[in-house]
Image (spheres, helix red, strand yellow):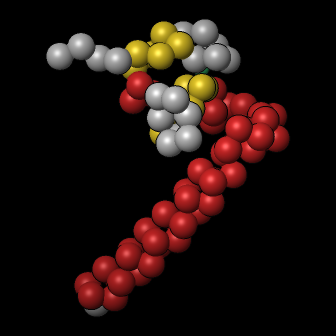
Amino acid sequence: MEVETKRCRYCGKELPLSEFYKLKITKDGHQSYCRECMNTYSRIRYKRIISFGGKQMLRLRDMRSRYYHKKKAKQDENKS
Ligand SMILES: [Zn+2]
């Protein structure tokens, strides 16, 4: 099976799609920047990311992390 790749718009590296965060509103369903660039430049790029729909992604991530903590708290409860 061939791995689908995408070129990061920031570092220009050709990377497998798994190296990109998912973003449903884009054509291929992935961010234009690789995970590494997103992590490194997230603060600098924050405004730009927001401008291409990252707001939704950030909210989703926030929701997910909240869900995770809730779940974890429940698990800890069950353990004791
Ligand atoms: Zn990159």
Q: At x 53% / y 13%, what residue is drawn?
A: 7
Q: Quadrant of the C terminus?
A: bottom left
Pinpoint residue 29: horizontal percent, then vertical percent. Answer: 47, 35
When the figure is inspected, residue 4 is found, relative to residue 63, above or below; the finding is above
Among all residues in the image, which is located at the extreme left? 1
Pinpoint residue 77: horizontal percent, then vertical percent. Answer: 34, 88
Along the line of sight, which residue is nearer the eye, 70 or 3? 3
Left or right: 50 in relation to 72:
right
Image quadrant in which you'd find residue 4? top left
Q: At x 60% / y 26%, what residue is drawn?
A: 33
Left or right: 71 in relation to 44:
left
Left or right: 66 in relation to 50:
left
Q: Count the numbered circles shown.
A: 0
Q: At x 47% / y 28%, what residue is drawn?
A: 28
Pinpoint residue 31: horizontal percent, then vertical percent. Answer: 56, 32
* Quarter of the rendered image showing ligand 1: top right
When the figure is inspected, residue 78 is found, relative to residue 14, above or below; the finding is below
Q: Quadrant of the N terminus?
A: top left
Pinpoint residue 63: horizontal percent, then vertical percent. Answer: 54, 66
Does residue 36 appear anywhere in the picture?
no
